[in-house]
Image: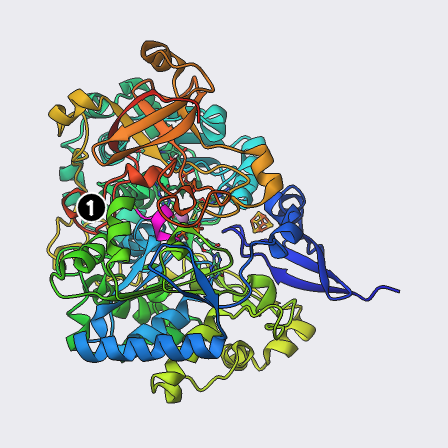
Amino acid sequence: MKNIKEVNSTCMWCHSHCAVTVKIEDGILSGIDANVNHPHAKLFTPLVRSCPRARAAVQYFYHPDRLHHPLKRMKDRGEGKWQQITWEQALDEIARSLLQLKEKYGPEAIANTQGTGRTHEEFRLRFFNLLGSPNNISQGMICNGPYYMTSCAIFGWYIYPMITSKTKCIFVHGGGIPMEYPPVWRAALNALNKGARLIVTDPRGLVAANRADVWLQLRPGTDTALIMGIINYIIEQELYDKEFVDKWCSGFKELSERARQYPLGKVSGITGVPVELLKEAAIMYATIKPAASIQGMGVEQLPNCIEALHARFALTAITGNVDVVGGEILQGPHPLQKSHVELEGVEFLSPEQRRKQIGADRFKLLSLPGYELIEPNVRRVWGRMCAGQTYGCYAHGPSVYRAMITGKPYPVRAAISTSSNPLLTQANTKLVYKALKSLDLYVVSDFFMTPSAGIADYVLPAATWLERPNIWDGFGLSKFISASEASFPKVKEGEFEHYTEFDLWRGLAVRMGYEKFWPWKTLEDVYDFRLSPLGYTLKEFVSQKGGWDSPPAEPKRYERSGFGTPSGKVELRSLILEKLGYDPLPKYEEPPEGPIASPNVAKEFPLILITGGRFNPFYHSEHRQIASHRKKRPWPKMQMNPATALELGIKEGDWVWIETPRGRVRQKCEFLKSISPRVVHGEHGWWYPELPGEEPWLYGVWESNINVCTDDEPDACNPISGGWPLRTALCKVYKAKEY
Ligand SMILES: Nc1nc2c(c(=O)[nH]1)N[C@H]1C(S)=C(S)[C@@H](COP(=O)(O)OP(=O)(O)OC[C@H]3O[C@@H](n4cnc5c(=O)[nH]c(N)nc54)[C@H](O)[C@@H]3O)O[C@H]1N2
Ligand SMILES: Nc1nc2c(c(=O)[nH]1)N[C@H]1C(S)=C(S)[C@@H](COP(=O)(O)OP(=O)(O)OC[C@H]3O[C@@H](n4cnc5c(=O)[nH]c(N)nc54)[C@H](O)[C@@H]3O)O[C@H]1N2
Ligand code: SF4
Ligand SMILES: [Mo]
């Protein structure tokens, strides 16, 4: 008889965070299925059952390339020669080296990189706050962080679309959604099937655009102008919600004046969208309610991103779609649990060390200056800061990489990457490579060798979500808690030595003299602590409550508490932005690298490159070693309009070079009739685990990795957030030899 165990858990392989049941037969993972007893089983079950990543779970978990033991570099960095060592030795040596660097250069010389946030970022932050280094680099600066901090500045919490059967209109701003956020798309489809209207802004026409009542195919990077034009038209036509604006918004007059600079004729000239379509979208959105907006990376990764988000939030507010069921809501936190925010320990970072955060003197919204201004306002109303530092308080990555190379404003000599693959996912790979190679110490924790791990001194084998307990509460932005125990034991001595990020950071902290700040010995202890106000341990919460708690939402809570902003109102004119020294109102700026702002560059590079549109089965740079996935998707595909390809003598399926002023990479051409003829799209995250790991190959990092082409010059970044532009580069495309 087989011993079959089933453990309910939350899948962390993508941001859908499905409720799953992990099946284990005689101690071996045999599959992942939907948790059919979960309160949201109806939503998750079809997702899990059609998910290529869930279906490949066994292949992934037991993949022969998975890292099982700590590795130490034997020869020069990047030579691909590794020696297996024990965790004891790895942690001892890394801790010793960090202490020496701290002594010599100060703690700020030690940086870290965060990826998309799929592990326990709170312990990394706690470690660095205690150490005294404010230099946390994060993909959050271009992913969700801009949305999060702009929303907190304007609404005093993270606003979120609550798409229900009541939703009558949906506005998707630069988001692909069916694949990227399948649960949101399923909810949207339900509403659309009941007659809701759909507006989409996107230079490519994919599933959402094809389904749209109004598709606004704008020139990449022009979203602020488009939204301000819509705002102006709505105000002119008096279609805005006067009652909500009078009672709950500040700065309406100033917003109206600013919006007047964006008449639809002018906006049409900037964006390339016909005036009639802009009018139709404006009338539809302002008159069909409740309306929910969905935000995508098409907007967050623009040089003008904060301004576009500011305008889009103002649009939500003046149409009265704030905190209404079927529109957009401010959920607030779970009222009892201690969230990860309380573990991050920002309070440990001294004022002197805070001032050293690289890039924070220039890019203030998503770094300590913005955080310190926003945090007390949010806390006043909600009891704590939204998602904490994990989603909104970083050093400026491009400036930190430059500091590694130049020693300015001061030396940065070490970095630790957990759950992040900067050589693939950070803009301007050549510069990132040079920076990481120049370090005295570079440590990577991952499940597999990656190009970034390939140039590290130590590579540490990480535990997947299957091997660790978890509390999932939507990054602390939501009211629910979903808790689970580990499906597998953490470490199998001598066989699998996968450490959780908690073990890693605590292991280093203890060796470096910070033990008293880490009173919990295991991750289970931490979760017991987090659940203690509810009166449960993790074990009890899982066995007695099914691991789930979701207090009812309270729409319009602002009527009794006000908004968590300086004025207690929705700040259309942002006092936070003003205090930080920025324009308090949204303003359109041309992308610095674009046909209008840099016509000379455009002569040689006439096309606009957008990058990173998501595709299954891959998740960013992950899963390239999974055979069944690669069978379906062996090569990267770039998309271009067939008319443009014809002009350039390119056939579908040809290998082509995509070249920008930074460099060139090869991808295979796919025709897409619905992409604007002057725009091309390059896939991101591509490397080839089957190629040699040693340099110069480094698993093919230079072959098809689109970030070789993207820009991270601080002058090209968003002036408020520092976000680097991933969707507005100029490029040329030409035929390459067969690969
Ligand atoms: N050009 C371009 N670049 C982009 C984007 C784009 O659209 N265009 N998108 C950006 C966005 S939105 C994001 S979020 C980033 C993503 O950037 P990253 O987060 O860096 O990318 P991933 O490939 O998802 O993950 C990096 C590594 O983390 C490992 N990993 C996963 N889970 C864990 C864990 O629990 N512990 C440990 N130790 N390791 C783990 C994976 O194996 C993988 O090697 O990329 C950004 N880069
Ligand atoms: N399968 C899979 N799913 C994923 C991921 C993955 O790697 N793989 N990554 C996850 C992560 S971390 C994230 S952040 C999300 C991102 O999910 P989304 O936000 O939906 O991001 P994308 O698909 O990158 O981009 C959305 C759309 O923006 C459009 N766009 C490009 N430039 C512009 C512009 O200037 N303006 C406008 N309005 N639109 C523009 C693109 O054409 C694209 O269709 O997906 C998540 N889901
Ligand atoms: S990888 Fe699949 S099962 Fe896991 S959260 Fe994403 S969609 Fe759900
Ligand atoms: Mo992301």
Q: Amino acid at mark 1?
A: Asn
Up/down of 112 relative to 643, above or below: below
Residue 647 at x, y = what percent? 32, 10
Asked where in the image residue 187 lies, by quadrant, the reply is top right
Residue at the image position 30 percent from the left and 26 percent from the top: 218
Q: Residues within 10 Å of mark 1 (few under 14, many from 20)?
A: many
Quadrant of the rendering where the N terminus is positioned:
bottom right
Badge count = 1
Left-right relation of 209 to 588: right
The part of the chain drawn in magenta is 421-426
Residue 65 at x, y = what percent? 56, 54
Residue 494 at x, y = what percent? 61, 73
Say whether residue 494 is visible. Answer: yes
Residue 354 at x, y = what percent? 19, 71
Residue at the image position 32 percent from the left and 70 percent from the top: 379
Q: Which residue is mark 1?
A: 718
Asked where in the image residue 444 lies, by quadrant, the reply is bottom left
| Foreground residue among 436 and 33 | 436
Does the stretch in magenta take in 257?
A: no
Up/down of 229 relative to 299, above or below: above
Q: Kindly state the secondary structure of the residue where label 1 is placed.
A: loop
Left-right relation of 86 to 322: right
Magenta span: chief secondary structure: helix
Does the stretch in magenta take in 424?
A: yes
Asked where in the image residue 595 lies, by quadrant, the reply is top left
| Foreground residue among 471 and 409 | 409
Quadrant of the rendering where the C terminus is positioned:
top left
Up/down of 698 relative to 7, above or below: above
Residue at the image position 42 percent from the left and 53 percent from the top: 329
Up/down of 603 relative to 308, above or below: above
Say whether residue 246 is visible. Answer: no
